Image (tube, rainbow, N blue to C red):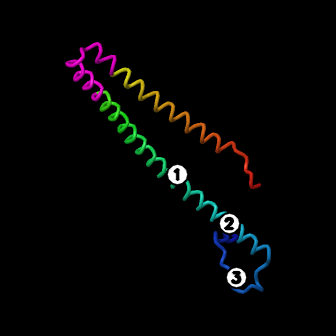
């Protein structure tokens, strides 16, 4: 006689008296494993969607930064051209370079000041504890 192949899913015993504690624990482990696999698949798909979104944000943000850089170069070129007719091309170039360096120094100083402020907040010990 051939032995019957056991079914993959055993019919659940509705009566608690017919089930054993081992069966209940095994079902609980199986349910937990199924839940864990489903949660991992869900989080994996969320990460994939977030990765695709982050790529798009980075690409559009990079393009925006490049266009802002071009706009600032055009503004600088316009400044040199407009000042060249008033004070000459060499002085116009010097004035625009000095102005841009002054603005860059101000931005750098502000960034350094804010960096020190944030670093101080991160390294400060909690006095309330």
Look at mark 2 in the image and give the residue it sits on. Answer: 32
Element type at marker 2? helix
Which residue is farthest right?
Answer: 21
Residue 94 percent location from the top left of the image: 34, 16
Disc 1 is placed on an element classified as helix
Residue 68's tag is none
Residue under circle 1?
47
Foreground: 71 or 13? 71
Nearer to us of marks 2 and 1 is 1
In the picture, measured across the screen, residue 28 lies left or right of residue 86, that is: right
Q: Horizontal and vertical percent for residue 128?
A: 74, 55
Disc nearer the start of the sequence (3/2):
3
Residue span colored magenta = 74-95
Q: Residue 13 carries which label?
A: 3
- Residue at 74% x, 85% y: name it: 16
Residue for point 67% across, 71% down: 4
Q: Tag 1: Cα neighbours inside 10 Å, few (<14), some, or many (≥20)?
A: few
Disc 1 vs disc 3: Cβ atoms closer than 8 Å?
no
Q: Does the magenta stretch include residue 89?
A: yes
| Residue situated in front as seen by the camera: 62 or 127 | 127
- Residue 116 shown in magenta: no
Quarter in which the N terminus is drawn: bottom right
Q: Which residue shows up at 65% across the image and 78% down it?
A: 11
From the image, give the main secondary structure of the stretch colored magenta. Answer: helix
Measured as percent of width and height from the top left, residue 5 is found at: 66, 69
């Amino acid at each position: 006689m051939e032995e019957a192949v056991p079914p993959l899913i055993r019919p659940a015993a509705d009566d608690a008296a017919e089930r054993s504690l081992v069966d209940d624990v095994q079902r609980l482990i199986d349910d937990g494993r199924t839940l864990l696999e489903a949660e991992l698949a869900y989080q994996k798909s969320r990460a994939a969607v977030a990765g695709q979104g982050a790529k798009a944000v980075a690409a559009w943000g990079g393009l925006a930064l490049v266009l802002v850089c071009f706009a600032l170069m055009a503004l600088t070129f316009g400044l040199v051209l407009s000042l060249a007719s008033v004070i000459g091309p060499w002085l116009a170039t010097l004035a625009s370079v000095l102005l841009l360096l002054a603005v860059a120094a101000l931005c750098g100083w502000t960034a350094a000041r804010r960096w020190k402020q944030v670093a101080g907040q991160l390294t400060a010990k909690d006095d309330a504890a």
